[in-house]
Image (cartoon, rainbow, N blue to C red):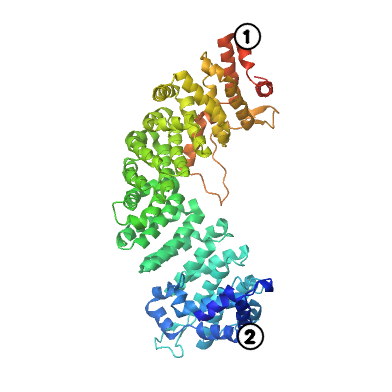
Amino acid sequence: MNLIKTIVKNDAYKPCKNIEDSKPESLEAHKIKTAFFTHPTLTEIGRRLVSHYFLLTAEELAMWEEDPEGFAVEETGGDSWKYSLRPCTEVLFLDIFHNYSQTLTPVLLEMVLNLQGPTNVEDSVQLLMKDAVYNAVGLAAYELFDNIDFDQWFNNQLLGELQVSHHRYKLIGSPPPSVVQRYKLIRRRVIWLIGQWISVKFKSDLRPLLYEVVLNLMQDPDLVVRIETATTLKLTVDDFEFRTEQFLPYLESIFSLLFQLLQQVTECDTKMQVLHVISCVIERVNIQIRPYVGCLVQYLPLLWKQSEEHNMLRCAILTTLIHLVQGLGAESKNLYPFLLPVIQLSTDVSQPPHVYLLEDGLELWLVTLENSPAITPELLRIFQNMSALLELSSENLRTCLQIVNAYIYLSATDFLQNYAEGLCRSFCNLLKDITNEGQVQVLKVVEVALKVSPVLGAHMFQPLLPSVFRGTVDGERYPVVMSTYLGIMGRVLLQNASFFSSLLTQMASEYNQEIGQLLGGVIEMWVDRMDNITQPERRKLSSLALLSLLPSDNSVVQEKFCGIINICVEALHDVMTEDSDTGTLKDCMLMSHFEEPKLTDDEEPPTEQDKRKKLLALEDPVHSVSLQQYAYEKLKAQQALMGDQGFGALMETVDTEIVRQLQEFLQGL
């Protein structure tokens, strides 16, 4: 079978579009292939695969009875087609169907048609055949898109088949597990079939009806049917067409049944499968899950303890916790007694399980911080794991740096006082051998620290700032790194001028230059590289920072006055927009108050961190200071310092067109 599959799929056996370009061997192979795969041969192969090889065997039916979990989660993905008969026949069927769909579609549709109407529950051969044909229709769902009206079939046939009452029977040729509930074969196959078609063709209006079906089948006496139903639920909830409001009336009952199923199953693989369904439901309904998670929250610590030897199951628990924390928001603080030790273990590189748990553990750590209403000593203590993680500088670096940012937003003072010294050392080591993109990620953390806490941030990251200063003066070649350097310089100059002054003194000594001369070099480079800065927020910050040097009687600042004004006018062009009510120009970056956004059902509510960022923005000069007003006041102060004549001479150093634009922006003030 694998040989036939390879022949069917082999591109070397297909002629090129332009026959002249084809190799003689390809043309010969194509000829042989065409001669073999005739209409009658393909029809026979299609029928035989479905009616013979797709039938459930006596061994499989015995396994269903004796080991339902093993039967339900039997491996069919990956490379299983290479060495296992059922996946092998299914993959061969799919490949042949895909390549010869015009021939095989009528064959399969005829088989479906022959099995419509009520099934004789006494006829086990017909039951097994229906299971096999429905399997084929599910596998070929995408190929059959135009040929089957699935919505109509669901309403007229499949729904009825899910409602047939339970009988008991003996299968022809099967061992006498006297034994199997006859129609559960079809219930399990039909709910599987719906799962295969849900993303292909299934009308949104029919979803509530499907949720009714899921609710019933999650109470089916047969475990295999319940597990298959849970899998189809995941496919339904995970689908693009999923609408939360349609699902909410069923949420409480279905979630309760999923939780029961999680407790009932005993195998790790099955528990993982059910946990993935639970995670998916929590993720899609978000905060609507809050009233129903009490039992799950109580059960997960027990499951975590039981799964000590099963790291993949623990990964599934971590994923569930991630979605649970996001759904609970600030209420997730009640989980900390369980949650924080889990994060601690998963992210400790000295513990063997971290090999499996680290990635999900970091994600859980991050969402826990983002949803935390306030710092706790225990939450702060976990950060001891971070220095070893930063030493790895692996693919998890981005998440690690997001975690650092989250701590800064959550409680900058507590965090920086406890950990900034070690963090600064880690950053200095990282910056020595890291890509430009990595440098930007690290430097953005420093920028966030300066934004949240200008004084403490500058003090704590003091050892790192000279390298930023050097990069600026030397004209860092990589634009995104230079832009980040200027963002950091802007924060220090604007919000901690005394620190900037002491840094300038320190660097002048290092460069063996006069302070004024070095300041002139910084301003000149800043003006020259302003185009490296693409974010409007950073462009406005640069303008505010350079304007903060005014008023000044320093000859160097006055020499660079023209450049400062050029940057100011550029930034005014970036941020000034016309007020639709008054027709006057206003700074579009100003934020005056914090509004809770109005959300639709499908939108995620803001996290606690989102709220912290909003409140911080209200105090950030970029969002609280009008650039227009600030420029006006600084120029007025410079004029008062120098007198009209001196100020007039200073303004003459600026291009007349720039002066005209500046006056336009400042008129009316």
Q: Position of residue 632 (x, y in %)?
A: 60, 19
The quarter of the picture where residue 454 lies is top left
Q: How far separated are the C-alphas under marks 1 and 2?
A: 98 Å
Foreground tag (1 vs 2): 2
Q: Amino acid at mark 1?
A: Gln
Total count of labels = 2
Give the percent coordinates (x, y) of residue 52.
Answer: 52, 86
Of 661 and 168, the residue lying toward us = 661
Q: Which residue is mark 1?
A: 645
Front residue of 328 and 48: 48
Q: Is residue 328 left or right of residue 267?
A: right
In terms of secondary structure, where does tag 2 sit? helix
**Which amino acid type is shown beneath numbered disc 2?**
Ala
From what the image shows, is residue 278 above or below residue 511? Answer: below
Task: Identify the image quadrant of the C terminus.
Answer: top right
Residue 347 is left or right of residue 249, and the answer is left
Residue beneath disc 2: 35
